[in-house]
């Protein structure tokens, strides 16, 4: 084929290189390529009949003894390349682009039909997509999560931009300059609305003791007798069978809003709570939950598994939850076309959680956002296959990265932006950045966060951005 892409690559870390070539060329760009590995190659060379592209190869040139060690982490502060230093038009979020790995001299030089790129595009993308730093650093918060504050993206100020997408755009611009007849995969911006069901009802499964605690919070913490009275009346109504009055029973409202914007909602249910309130206070096999799941699917929306707090890296528990999820969905006549999941508390252990999910037959994860700060944890807003760093293999599990969880932005314990204009502008800016790369903007809004009027208004305002 005249415009087929041929890659000449060093042979070190062959499985890892093959993976990142597949992701960038096949998954992201939709291009056919052929690669040959050689001990004699010093850089990655992309060869066409009409020219060639020579790319920096610093990350995978490390000694094998440094693999997954701190010595392999990028030197900081990161160097940057300015947009006006790139000899062709390309799509970037800002004029300056941080470079994770690259040559000492980050020059991009174009001479006739030859382009030399001093950015290690493949190594830098691999670092972000595989969450390499999370395995190396192994830093955890109180919930066993890798925090945003420990990440390179946060420390170097690029968490709010999909840096891998930017690297891919540079590569694509270079490819299309050498071979203008190339056609890349077409993409369209999409809004993916997701809802973790930690509590399907506020009062339905609550006993009198629990309701007293709610009223105490209303009076002592919120200092609102009006709210306490409203909650008490709601509790009585729900307990008498009027579950439509439960403030967390927002499933129809959520689906109405999604349908008004022409998109689907994805709901994730906890299948097993192990008797712990942290895992949700409901029985997944309860007839009312089965009815809700059936209703969701009948209206054309999606259901997935919300992997419990306890099962994040526990194969036995995750398998048990998957089996129960399949059983209940079958009973509801609502078996999903694609088995997708998200971890409760975004409690992902890399790569153990991914390996277990793959073994359990889960095919898409939507967990990868930081709890303490919204943004592009993986540096990308496109779906892609995951890679097991410790086993050195590509997984059947794909990641559609979560970009914003509402409480990450709103709550005092995290970004503390509240439910007003500040949060709207921030989330909208991330949405606009995603649209710039025709990506998928994955938003998480819990079903129990529609009780507060300001938060409901913020959500509805964001949905309207599509129209």
Image (spheres, grey):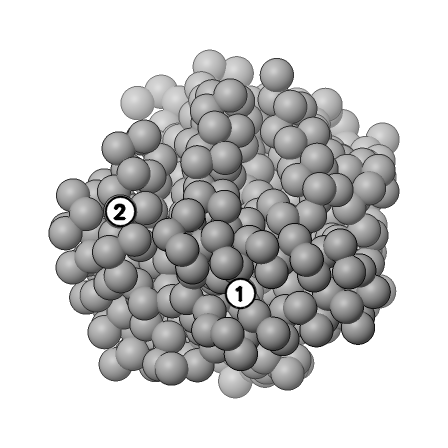
Task: Identify the residue shown where x is 76% and y is 28%.
Answer: 87
Task: Identify the residue shown where x is 60% and y is 60%.
Answer: 232
Instruction: Return the disc, 2 or 1, that comes first in the chain's sequence.
Output: 2
* Callout in the foreground (2, 1): 2
Q: Nearer the viewer, residue 434 or 227?
A: 227
**On screen, 248 above or below 28?**
below
Q: Nearer the viewer, residue 301 or 341?
A: 301
Secondary element at tag 2: helix
Task: Identify the residue shown where x is 77% and y is 46%.
Answer: 419
Q: Which residue is mark 2?
A: 291
Q: Quadrant of residue 466?
A: top right
Mark number for residue 310?
none
Residue 82 on image: x %, y %: 84, 39
Secondary element at tag 1: helix
Residue 26 on image: x %, y %: 38, 38
Crowding at dot 2, Cα within 10 Å, few <14 / some 14-19 / many 20+, comes out as some
Question: Can the viewer see residue 41 in this picture?
Answer: no
Left or right: residue 155 versus residue 191 is right
Q: Nearer the viewer, residue 366 or 405?
A: 405
Between the C-alphas of marks 2 and 1, the distance is: 27 Å
Q: Quadrant of residue 214?
A: bottom right
Residue 157 on image: x %, y %: 81, 55
Crowding at dot 1, Cα within 10 Å, few <14 / some 14-19 / many 20+, comes out as many
Q: Are marks 2 and 1 in contact (CB under 8 Å)?
A: no
Q: State which quarter of the image contains the C terminus.
A: top right
**On screen, 246 above or below 10?**
above
Left or right: residue 279 versus residue 287 is right
Mark number for residue 346?
1
Residue 434 on image: x %, y %: 63, 34
Question: Can the viewer see residue 237 in this picture?
Answer: yes
Q: State which quarter of the image contains the N terminus.
A: top left
Task: Identify the residue shown where x is 44% and y is 36%.
Answer: 252
């Amino acid at each position: 084929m005249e415009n087929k892409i041929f890659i000449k690559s060093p042979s070190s870390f062959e499985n890892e290189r093959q993976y990142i070539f597949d992701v960038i060329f096949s998954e992201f760009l939709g291009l056919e390529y052929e690669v040959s590995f050689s001990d004699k190659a010093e850089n990655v060379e992309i060869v066409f009949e009409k020219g060639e592209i020579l790319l920096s190869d610093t990350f995978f040139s490390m000694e094998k003894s440094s693999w997954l060690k701190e010595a392999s982490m990028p030197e900081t502060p990161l160097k940057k390349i300015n947009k006006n230093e790139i000899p062709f038009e390309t799509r970037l979020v800002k004029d300056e682009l941080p470079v994770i790995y690259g040559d000492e001299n980050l020059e991009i030089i174009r001479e006739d039909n030859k382009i030399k790129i001093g950015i290690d595009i493949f190594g830098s993308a691999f670092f972000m997509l595989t969450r390499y730093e999370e395995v190396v650093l192994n830093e955890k918060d109180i919930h066993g999560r890798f925090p945003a504050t420990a990440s390179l993206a946060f420390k170097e100020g690029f968490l709010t931009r999909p840096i891998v997408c930017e690297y891919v755009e540079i590569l694509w611009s270079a490819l299309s300059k050498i071979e203008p007849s190339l056609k890349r995969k077409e993409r369209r911006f999409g809004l993916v609305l997701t809802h973790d069901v930690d509590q399907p009802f506020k009062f339905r499964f609550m006993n009198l003791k629990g309701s007293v605690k709610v009223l105490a919070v209303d009076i002592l913490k919120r200092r609102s007798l009006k709210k306490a009275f409203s909650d008490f009346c709601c509790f009585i109504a729900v307990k008498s069978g009027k579950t439509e009055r439960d403030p967390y029973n927002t499933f129809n409202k959520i689906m109405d809003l999604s349908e008004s914007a022409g998109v689907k909602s994805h709901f994730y249910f906890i299948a097993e709570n192990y008797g712990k309130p942290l895992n949700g206070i409901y029985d997944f096999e309860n007839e009312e939950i089965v009815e809700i799941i059936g209703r969701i699917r009948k209206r054309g929306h999606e259901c997935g598994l919300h992997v419990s707090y306890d099962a994040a890296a526990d194969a036995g528990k995750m398998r048990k939850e998957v089996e129960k999820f399949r059983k209940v969905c079958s009973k509801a006549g609502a078996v999903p076309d694609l088995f997708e999941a998200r971890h409760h508390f975004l409690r992902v252990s890399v790569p153990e959680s991914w390996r277990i999910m793959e073994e359990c037959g889960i095919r898409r994860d939507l967990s990868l956002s930081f709890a303490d700060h919204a943004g592009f944890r993986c540096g990308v807003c496109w779906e892609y296959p995951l890679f097991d760093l410790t086993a050195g293999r590509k997984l059947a599990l794909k990641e559609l990265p979560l970009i914003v969880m509402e409480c990450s932005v709103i709550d005092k314990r995290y970004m503390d932006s509240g439910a007003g204009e500040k949060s709207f502008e921030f989330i909208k800016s991330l949405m606009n950045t995603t649209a710039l790369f025709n990506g998928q903007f994955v938003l998480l809004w819990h079903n129990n966060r529609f009780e507060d009027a300001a938060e409901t208004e913020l959500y509805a305002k964001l949905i309207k951005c599509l129209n």
